[in-house]
Image (spheres, rainbow, N blue to C red):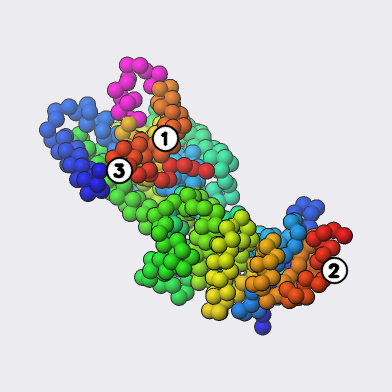
């Protein structure tokens, strides 16, 4: 059974069909990349999966159980973590406070909470910024903080929206290494990215979206050869 | 200045403040300070709703007013002990907070402010309409005070203020407070890190309204009367001034604001209606140049670290 299954998901905004009969499966321990031109419905798909917006039709399953009527905070308890394209750290809170504002889920006991936060901040290289206001961090550091904050929830499935956009190449490397490392520890990733180079290198499988639909799917090598993809990007 | 020195100075100020009523014969100032205590409770309790969860309510003085009426009814109709009646007023405030909290979930930003403001207007209309139970404009009188001794009144209200501030500070600095602040900053992000935003927003309303009800009860047992005028806009305006001038999101800030606004209004009586204009200008200047308020200013001067949390989005 796949970890995540999206079945004919459709979402309209007024007359515009943002996600159109989209189906997708992600297996446990996989890294799946979603690519596609701007406005192709990638972020809307992620918003549907983590419950920020509701489906018009279709279904979404996590380990075979329907989750499309659940709220984001309920999905956190089921193991779905999420980061955003425009980073949503709590700018007025300190780095450590950002980490501690998360809820406890399953394994993370109350006692080792601070310990866990410090460990994760060490992992992303923000240990020396504990008391800095999150708003004062650089864009890349905010991305790292957001990822670390998501990891506090000990998610099994991580939805990352443009984790490499507007980030220093060094941090892109660091993020990629972190993702591969966490995959080894059993975590599953669904990543949206415009950085074709990095996402091809990271992913086991790529899904290409255009105008709300899936237009291609396959290994990064297969996708590079796909004429449909070239057409979606270049419009020829 | 070091943190320990700040604590020492605060403790000294509190001690001097606490023994001052025993030394002074000035009951006029005592009476002013009793009212300051009551409004400081109201301002601090507003902060957990506005400064922590970012719900810009304009209905806080409505809760305060109904807390006052409940206390008055308990005493006048059921002959309840005034202290017990004040507690019932606080509990009724909490109940109202639960209702308002649930009602407010559907509204955000300006709409939320408008809806809660409508509740205040509605409260005034109700209090004027049902004169049999509210006394209308003339109000209800002869409410038994907790005590007639101003010195004792000072200590009772000061004690209530301390309990309010300490309990709200403990809450605010706990993880519950952190989660409330994260909701104020970004509700969607708060949801995605597992925070049940509905629950925390309602909780903030319940807790804030409990203390508003308490302040209402203390007010009515101190003034021994209550009428429809408790829902006048003046009270709300004064509360906003306290919150803004003191510096929201810190609990202590609005308390400092309450002292500043109440004492200035009292000692500037000679300029009459110009007082509100003056306070309004002070608030605009503070918001423009020092959004963290007087509390932020003091803490920056003493500790050289800026205080956070003043802003509401």
Residue at 74% x, 56% y: name it.
A38
Q: Disc 3 or disc 1, which is closer to the eye?
A: 3
- Place of residue B215 in the rendered image (x, y in percent of width and height, measured from the top left): 34, 41
User: Vertical placement of A124 versus B94: above or below?
Assistant: below
What type of secondary structure mainly makes up the magenta span?
Answer: helix
Residue A104 within the segment the image draws in magenta = no
Between disc 3 and disc 1, whose residue precedes?
A: 1
Extreme-top residue of the structure: B270
**Residue under numbered circle 2:** A227
Classify mark 1: helix, strand or loop. Answer: loop
Quarter where residue B60 is shown: top left
Closest to the observer: A165 or B107?
Answer: A165
Judge left or right: residue B152 versus residue A43. left
- Compare residues B305 and B152 and report the one nearer the observer: B305
Q: Is B59 placed left or right of B15 in the picture?
A: right
**In 3D space, how far apart are the residues under numbered discs 3 and 1 (Cα atoms)?**
16 Å
Q: Which mark is residue B210?
A: none
- Say whether residue B145 is left or right of residue B127: left
Q: What element carries label 3?
A: helix
Provide the residue designation for mark 1. B290
Residue at 18 percent across and 42 percent down: it is B12
Examine the rendered structure and indicate whether residue A3 appears above or below residue A52.
Answer: below
How far apart marks 1 and 2 lie (CA) works out to: 59 Å
Disc 2 is attached to a residue of which chain? A
| Marks 2, 3: nearer the viewer | 2
Q: What stretch is highlighted in magenta?
A: B261-275
Tell me where residue B6 appears, x and y as whole percent.
24, 44
Query: Quarter-wise, where is residue A73 in the image?
Result: bottom right
Is residue B25 visible from the viewing direction of this image? Answer: yes
A144 in relation to B143, above or below: below
Percent x, y for residue A28? 62, 79
């Amino acid at each position: 059974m796949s970890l995540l299954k999206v079945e004919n998901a459709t979402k309209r905004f007024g007359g515009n069909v943002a996600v159109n009969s989209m189906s997708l499966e992600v297996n446990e321990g996989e890294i799946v990349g979603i690519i596609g031109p701007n406005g192709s419905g990638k972020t809307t798909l992620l918003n549907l999966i983590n419950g920020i917006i509701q489906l018009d039709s279709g279904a979404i399953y996590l380990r075979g159980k329907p989750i499309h009527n659940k709220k984001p905070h309920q999905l956190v308890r089921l193991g779905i973590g999420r980061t955003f394209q425009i980073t949503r750290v709590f700018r007025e809170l300190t780095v450590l406070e950002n980490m501690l504002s998360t809820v406890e889920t399953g394994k993370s006991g109350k006692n080792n909470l601070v310990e866990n936060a410090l460990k994760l901040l060490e992992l992303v290289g923000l240990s020396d910024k504990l008391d800095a206001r999150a708003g004062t961090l650089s864009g890349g550091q905010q991305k790292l903080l957001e990822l670390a904050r998501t990891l506090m929830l000990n998610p099994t499935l991580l939805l990352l929206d443009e984790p490499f956009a507007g980030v220093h190449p060094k941090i892109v490397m660091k993020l990629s290494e972190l993702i591969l490392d966490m995959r080894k520890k059993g975590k599953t990733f669904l990543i949206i990215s415009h950085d074709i180079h990095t996402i091809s290198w990271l992913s086991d499988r790529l899904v290409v979206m255009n105008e709300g639909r899936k237009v291609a799917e396959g290994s990064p090598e297969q996708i590079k050869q796909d004429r449909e993809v070239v057409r979606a990007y270049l419009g020829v | 200045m070091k943190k320990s020195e700040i604590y020492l100075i605060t403790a000294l100020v509190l001690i001097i403040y606490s023994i001052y009523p025993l030394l002074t014969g000035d009951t006029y100032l005592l009476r002013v300070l009793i009212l300051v205590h009551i409004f400081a409770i109201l301002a601090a309790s507003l902060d957990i709703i506005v400064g922590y969860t970012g719900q810009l309510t304009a209905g806080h003085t409505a809760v305060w007013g109904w807390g006052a009426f409940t206390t008055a009814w308990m005493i006048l109709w059921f002959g309840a002990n005034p202290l017990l009646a004040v507690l019932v007023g606080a509990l009724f405030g909490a109940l109202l907070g639960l209702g308002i909290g649930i009602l407010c979930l559907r509204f955000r930003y300006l709409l939320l402010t408008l809806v809660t403001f409508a509740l205040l207007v509605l409260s005034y209309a109700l209090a004027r309409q049902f004169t049999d139970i509210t006394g209308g404009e003339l109000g209800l009188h002869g409410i038994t005070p907790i005590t007639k001794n101003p010195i004792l009144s000072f200590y009772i209200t000061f004690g209530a203020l301390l309990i309010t501030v300490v309990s709200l500070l403990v809450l605010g600095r706990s993880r519950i407070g952190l989660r409330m602040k994260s909701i104020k900053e970004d509700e969607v992000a708060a949801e995605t890190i597992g925070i049940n935003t509905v629950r925390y927003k309602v909780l903030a309303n319940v807790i804030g309204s409990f203390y508003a009800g308490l302040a209402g009860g203390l007010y009515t047992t101190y003034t021994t009367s209550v009428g429809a005028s408790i829902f006048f806009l003046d009270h709300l305006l004064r509360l906003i001034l306290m919150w803004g001038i003191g510096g929201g999101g810190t609990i202590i800030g609005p308390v400092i604001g309450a002292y500043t606004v109440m004492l200035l209004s009292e000692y500037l009586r000679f300029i009459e209606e110009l007082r509100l204009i003056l306070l309004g200008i002070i608030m605009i200047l503070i918001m423009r140049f020092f959004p963290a308020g007087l509390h932020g200013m003091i803490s920056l001067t003493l500790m050289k670290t800026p205080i956070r949390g003043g802003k509401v989005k």
